[in-house]
Image (cartoon, helix red, strand yellow):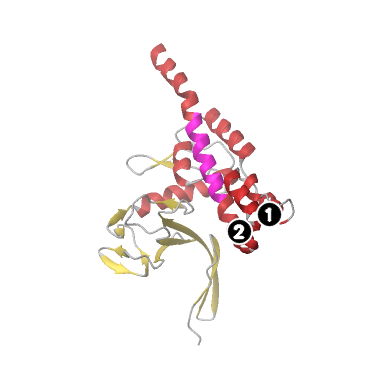
Amino acid sequence: MFVGAILFFLPYNSLRLIINNNQINIKIMKTISVGRDSSNDIVVDNKIVSRHHAHFTINSQGQVAIKDLGSPNGTYVNDTKTTGCVLAPGDVVKLGNVVFDWQTNLQLLNQQIDTTPGAGEKLSEQGNILPNSLHISSLIVAELPVLVRNELVTLPAQWQQEFAEEYTRNKKSLGLAYLFLIIIFCAHYGYLKKWGLQILFWVTAGGLGIWWLIDLFRLPGLVKNYNIDLAIHVMRNLKVANRPVQNKTMMGD
């Protein structure tokens, strides 16, 4: 009788193949990254936390595991340092010495990136799930940083639609960015509205090819960071633009 287990991990959604007693179960895994860098799914703005500190995996049964990504300050579960383990409800997770409320954060994120109908729920201050309050495409929601998602669920449906239209109109495409880099005069920085870098790139001939080669691999991150900054900018402008409406409504009452 063969007893064992083989794990395969791929970014974001991945498969885990479990071989046990000659039976094979395949479970869908979801990977969520945590760290100080804005490219993470959950951003923790604290210098104690590494840029890419840890990631969580959630399988189709809702089981959650945490894995430290070699962070200098370590990851702790119930005050015990760990490189990786399965979490149980009530476990206290610390990134360095920063307490991380993993249950609330993962539940909120998981609801917001779910692509099935009825996704997009939010949590009350008591940690209870409130009725659906997202009124835009889940495909758009999945691209947004967590801070913007958290803001979206508090806004009226009309404001959410305004946000989605403005964000979709101005966001950058990775495919077009590669088109500019490879074919259209190496103008990928211009496409991302970084004209200072674009001029420097042209003047140095792409660092005699070295810079060009590096950007070939960096471009997905550059586009993602541009769209993250765009989402934050659009959200900020939307709230500022609608602030007088809120004030007038309050005065009218």
Q: State yes or no: residue 29 in magenta.
A: no
Q: Which residue has dot 1 on it?
A: 181
Q: Secondary structure at mark 2?
A: helix
Residue 90 visible from this viewpoint: yes
Examine the residues drawn in magenta and state their main secondary structure: helix
Question: Over which residues does the magenta segment extend?
Answer: 224-238
Q: Quadrant of the C terminus?
A: top left
The residues bearing labels 2 and 1 have C-alpha atoms spaced at a distance of 8 Å
- Residue in view at x 62 percent, y 38 percent: 170
The earlier-in-sequence mark between 2 and 1 is 1
Q: Quadrant of residue 137?
A: top right
Q: Which residue has dot 2 on it?
A: 215
In depth, the one of 147 and 171 nearer the eye is: 171
Left or right: 32 as drawn, with respect to 198: left
Q: Amino acid at mark 2?
A: Asp
In depth, the one of 221 and 35 nearer the eye is: 221
Q: Amino acid at mark 1?
A: Leu
Q: Residues within 10 Å of mark 2 (few under 14, many from 20)?
A: some
The picture places residue 86, in percent across and down from the top left corner, at 38, 66
- Residue in view at x 72 percent, y 51 percent: 185
Residue lying at the far front of the rendered structure: 203
- Residue in view at x 50 percent, y 81 percent: 21
In depth, the one of 137 and 185 nearer the eye is: 185
The picture places residue 33, in percent across and down from the top left corner, at 45, 58
